[in-house]
Image: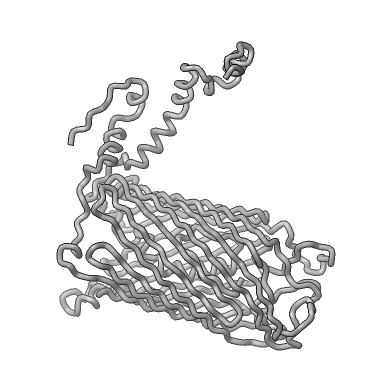
């Protein structure tokens, strides 16, 4: 901790990276920088559009339900794993086979 | 329930008040419990599905009928059994044909899965997992999977994880020719060629209700594979060297999906995007566009366009004769080359609800789908067809 309080080090460090200033003002500046991102994440996580369950009629349509196509996607994922270099992201894993 | 905000100025004042309220309500569990008709009546529900899957390219044809049964208990437990038979007809060297000979091989695959949804909690949690077994004459695969899910804010937000482990045992079953192993490594197909391949995969996903008609999904997949990652039948230099791939592979994938429902036209537009990279220097991007159109309350069509492009692995050479006996890794795998795919697909979905009042409720609740996809592929596999059909009957 002594190094952090060395005047020359602290002074140049504050000048270089004000957001990471270990002093009280520095901590606040770091949080200020993160606030917009934090707000966006927390709002999205809490559903800040506040769509009530009874307002989700359209989201319950068959075309909006990915899980409904999970069985169809299983064989299709198997084809992609045997014919393409990328794998994953399909929500379901294909079976291992000698078709590599 | 009234939420008391602490008057700590600089932090809470900066966050939108409505967001803070929504978070507080969600975390404190004030939202109502989801009603469960099954729990009230004590009725078991489920469904049975039969599916037909078909794949074709210039050297391989696959017919794969599939049977699925699901059962859900009143308390929220559910079970699922999936049985698939893969009948593979191939003249491909990669499948074991040493000469121009066509053969058919059968693969059996069984999935056993179960789970329970804890809906009594303020934030419902679902735990789901299971096993998969796959066997064919020269290949055995065992996989296990565990998938926890949690919903927040009245199910407006969903976080899902998935962890899986797979163990494969790879043999060799040569057909035609002199029955010599590729690369003339000595011995015949009767010799016990046995290799293993293991894989661990972890994934995380986030789904968010944005508006009454807009849904967003983001996910990340990581897979680590180790063991025999080549094909025991492929070779280079005119059969003088068997295929040799690195024995470890680290694979990363990011995916996202945006789904938008247009009530006026009863249309759903979806944009999907996958971005992939691994330590073999294979990189890929994969955008996809889907249009779902409700033609009537019980008839829906889906059109999709998918584009896929990838780079070659660091050890792949387009001319097999450019390899030498000093190369550590050699490959004759078209999946290791740089190529792209343009794919078009169409699906028709028919719901049995038009028979409501005129047929048994299981028939009225049935669902039939049929799809056809054509892939214009620029690598050695050539163009491909994937067709599927399915009938789902609830009970």
Quadrant location of the N terminus of chain B? Answer: top left
> Residue B374: in sight, yes or no?
no
- Location of residue B230 in the rendering, given as x and y in whole percent from the top left corner: 67, 68
Question: How far from the left and from the top, in percent, is residue B240?
Answer: 81, 75
Residue pictured at 37% horizontal, 78% vertical: B50
User: What colour-coding does the image apply?
Assistant: one colour
Using the rendered view, name the quadrant where residue B361 is placed.
bottom left
Viewed as shown, does residue B275 lie left or right of B280? Answer: left
Image quarter where the C terminus of chain B lies is: bottom left
Residue at the extreme top: A7
Kindly indicate the quadrant of the structure image that contains residue B355.
bottom left
Reply above or below: B190 against A79.
below
Instruction: Report the residue at 29% width, 40% height from top.
Output: B27
The residue nearer to you, when weighing B265 against B310, is: B310
The image shows residue B132 at horizontal and vertical percentages of: 47, 71
The answer to whether B74 is drawn above or below residue B135 in the figure is above
Percent position of residue B14, x then y: 36, 25
Residue B349 is at least partly visible in this image: yes
Q: State the residue lying farthest toward the front.
A: A2
In front of the other: A46 or B211: A46
Name the side, left or right, on which B134 lies relative to B175: left
Residue at image position (67%, 72%) is B231
Considering only vertical position in the picture, is B96 above or below B74?
below
Q: Residue at x 32, y 42 (%)?
A: A47
Identify whether B125 is placed above or below B134: above
């Amino acid at each position: 901790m002594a190094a952090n309080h060395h005047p020359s080090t602290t002074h140049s460090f504050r000048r270089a990276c004000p957001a990471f200033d270990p002093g009280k003002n520095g901590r606040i500046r770091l949080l200020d920088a993160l606030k917009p991102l934090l707000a966006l994440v927390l709002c999205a996580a809490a559903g800040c559009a506040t769509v009530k369950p009874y307002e989700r009629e359209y989201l319950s349509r068959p075309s909006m339900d990915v899980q409904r196509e999970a069985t169809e996607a299983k064989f299709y994922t198997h084809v992609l794993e045997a014919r393409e270099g990328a794998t994953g992201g399909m929500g379901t894993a294909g079976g291992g086979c000698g078709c590599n | 329930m009234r939420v008391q905000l602490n008057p700590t100025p600089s932090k809470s004042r900066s966050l939108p008040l409505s967001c803070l309220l929504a978070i507080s309500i969600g975390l404190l569990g004030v939202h109502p419990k989801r009603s469960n008709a099954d729990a009230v009546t004590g009725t078991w529900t489920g469904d049975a599905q039969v599916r037909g899957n078909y794949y074709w390219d210039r050297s391989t044809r696959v017919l794969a009928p599939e049977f699925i049964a699901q059962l859900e208990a009143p308390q929220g437990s559910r079970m699922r059994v999936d049985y698939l038979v893969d009948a593979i007809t191939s003249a491909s060297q990669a499948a074991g044909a040493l000469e121009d000979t066509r053969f058919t091989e059968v693969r059996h695959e069984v999935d056993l899965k179960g789970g329970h949804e804890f809906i009594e909690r303020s934030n419902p949690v679902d735990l789901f997992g299971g096993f998969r077994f796959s066997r064919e004459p020269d290949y055995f695969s065992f996989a296990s999977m565990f998938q926890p899910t949690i919903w927040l804010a009245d199910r407006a937000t969903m976080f899902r994880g998935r962890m899986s482990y797979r163990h494969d045992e790879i043999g060799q079953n040569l057909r035609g020719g002199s029955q010599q192993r590729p690369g003339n490594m000595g011995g015949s197909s009767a010799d016990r060629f046995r290799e293993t391949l293991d894989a661990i995969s972890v994934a995380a996903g986030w789904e968010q209700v944005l508006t009454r008609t807009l849904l967003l999904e983001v996910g990340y997949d990581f897979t680590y594979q180790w063991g025999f990652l080549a094909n025991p039948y492929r070779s280079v230099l005119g059969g003088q060297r068997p295929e040799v791939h690195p024995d470890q592979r680290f694979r990363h994938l990011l995916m996202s999906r945006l789904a938008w429902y247009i009530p006026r036209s009863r249309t759903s537009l979806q944009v999907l995007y996958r971005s992939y990279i691994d330590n073999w220097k294979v990189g890929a991007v994969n955008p996809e566009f889907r249009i779902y159109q409700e033609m009537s309350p019980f008839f829906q069509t889906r059109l999709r366009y998918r584009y896929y492009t990838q780079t070659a692995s660091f050890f792949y050479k387009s001319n097999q004769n450019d390899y030498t006996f000093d190369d550590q890794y050699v490959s004759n795998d078209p999946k290791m080359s740089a190529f792209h795919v343009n794919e078009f697909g169409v699906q028709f979905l028919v719901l049995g609800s038009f028979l409501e009042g005129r047929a048994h409720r299981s028939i009225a609740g049935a669902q039939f789908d049929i799809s056809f996809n054509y892939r214009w592929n620029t690598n050695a596999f050539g163009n491909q067809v994937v067709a599927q059909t399915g009938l789902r009957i609830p009970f």
